[in-house]
Amino acid sequence: MNVPVIIVLKGVKPTAEKRLHGDDLEFNRFHRALRLLMDSPLNKSKKMKIYIHTARNALVELSYLLEVPENPAELSDAMSYLLKRMVIKSSDGTVLGKVVKNPVTNHLPPNSTKIRLSPRGCKMSSKDLESSLERGFVFFIDIGSEEEREEAEFDMKLSDFKLSPESCCAKITNMFEELLQIF
């Protein structure tokens, strides 16, 4: 088992369209979800990989070393740069993010369990997932309003309540940090 958890953020508009006023809610949601994922102990321990599948069908692979800026406008600028140059590097030349070739399934481990988060899915807990941990898990989280089902094997819900993408990311990272005993 290399990376037990892969997160694919789908339907992302990687630049803030209404950024002058700071009221691009969808981009702000993406910013908060990405900050939460990148700052998690699961990511920092190299047990999670993150891909961004944009609304314009670009696929971005992120390094666990990427630090998401606190300001959404700075993230918007960084994403614009990344999509234009196809790569973003740190000052020492380390690749922090790069555009990779579609489809995302080419970058996923074989035999991994592919799950789409949906309020209509079956409810599962960490105990339900523990038996398949060796295969690895891929979670597809819709940030935008688009819903696609083709990559996922089944739908799963994390709560009986409708959760924001940020809350879903928090629940997933907490669940796997507990399972893998990462603190």
Image (cartoon, rainbow, N blue to C red):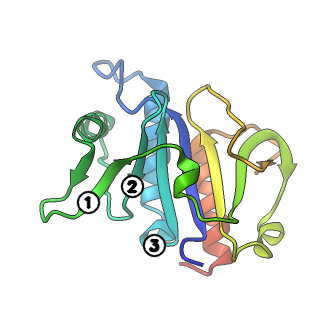
Measuring from the top left, give residue 33's x and y in whole percent.
Answer: 50, 46
- The residue carrying mark 2 is 62
Q: Is residue 66 left or right of residue 166?
A: left
Q: Is residue 34 above or below residue 30?
A: below
- Mark 3: secondary structure: loop
Q: Position of residue 86 (x, y in %)?
A: 27, 43
- Pointer 1: what residue? 95
Q: Specify the label residue 46 is tagged with.
A: 3
The amino acid on which the numbered mark 2 sits, given as a three-letter code, is Leu
Characterize the local packing of mark 3: few (<14), some (14-19) or many (20 or more) Cα atoms within 10 angstroms.
Answer: some
Residue type indicated by callout 1: Val
Q: Where residue 162 sits in the image (x, y, percent)?
A: 74, 37
Label 1 or label 3, whichever comes before in sequence order: 3
* CB under 8 Å between discs 1 and 2: no
Disc 3/disc 2 C-alpha distance (Å): 12 Å
Q: Which mark is residue 21?
A: none
| Disc 1 residue crowd, few under 14, some 14–19, many 20+, Cα 10 Å | some
Residue drawn at the location 75% of the way across and 40% of the way down: 118
Name the amino acid, label 3.
Lys
- Give x and y (percent) for residue 10: 55, 38
Q: Nearer the viewer, mark 1 or mark 3?
A: 1
Mark 1 residue element: strand
Residue at image x 45%, y 48%? Answer: 34
| Mark 1 → mark 2, Cα distance in angstroms | 9 Å
- Residue depicted at 43% across the width and 58% down the height: 38
Q: Nearer the viewer, residue 22 or 87?
A: 87
The residue at the point 71 percent across, 39 percent down is 150
